Amino acid sequence: MGSARYKREHTKKGLCQDCQRPAVWGKLFCEVHLERRRKSAEKSNPIQRDKYISEGRCPKCSIKLEEDEKKYCLKCGNERRKDATNRIYA
């Protein structure tokens, strides 16, 4: 989040590059931001997404799908429809 100088200074002080928390030893980010980055990378990984689909789980939030749900859970499917509608009428 910030300029290169901000990130350099935080790294020298042993702080997370995105906030003021102490960084995990040997990493650039705190536990909170490492977990967020891990989850984000997991969702965007096509191999992981295909694995979720083959296991009958929602590729967006990884919860088990009900019998009447096809690819996405109701929550994620509704979000996708709202986004598409907003893009059409915006």
Image (cartoon, rainbow, N blue to C red):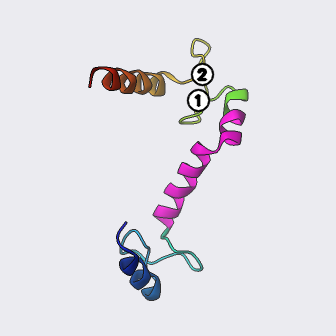
Mark with earlier residue (1, 2): 1
Residue 58, given in percent of the width and then of the height, sits at 59, 29
Dot 2 alpha-carbon crowd within 10 angstroms: few under 14, some 14 to 19, many 20 or more:
some
Q: Point out the stretch of residues depicted in magenta.
A: 31-51
Q: Is residue 45 left or right of residue 17?
A: right
Mark 1 secondary-structure assignment:
loop
Helix, strand or loop for disc 2: loop
Please name the residue shown 61% across and 28% down the image: 64
Q: Which residue is mark 1?
A: 58
Q: Quadrant of residue 71?
A: top right
Name which residue type carries label 2: Lys
Q: In the picture shown, does residue 31 fall above or below 20?
A: above
Image mark for residue 71? 2
* Marks 1 and 2 close (CB-CB < 8 Å): yes
Q: Residue furthest left?
A: 90
What kind of residue is marked 1? Answer: Cys
Q: Overall secondary structure of the magenta stretch?
A: helix
Q: Is residue 72 left or right of residue 21?
A: right
Residue at 54% across, 36% down: 61
Q: Residue at x 48, y 70 (%)?
A: 30
What label sits on residue 89 in the rendered view? none
Identify the image quadrant of the C terminus: top left
What is the residue that sits farthest to the bottom in this orientation?
12
Percent x, y for residue 49? 65, 37
Q: What's the CA distance linking mark 1 and mark 2?
A: 6 Å
> Quick one: 64 or 1, which is closer to the camera?
1
Within 10 Å of disc 1 (Cα), the crowding (few <14, some 14-19, many 20+) is: many
Residue under the image location 36 percent in, 73 percent down: 3
Inspect the magenta stretch and tell me whether residue 55 lies in it: no
Residue 39, placed above or below residue 61 = below
Q: Quadrant of residue 1?
A: bottom left
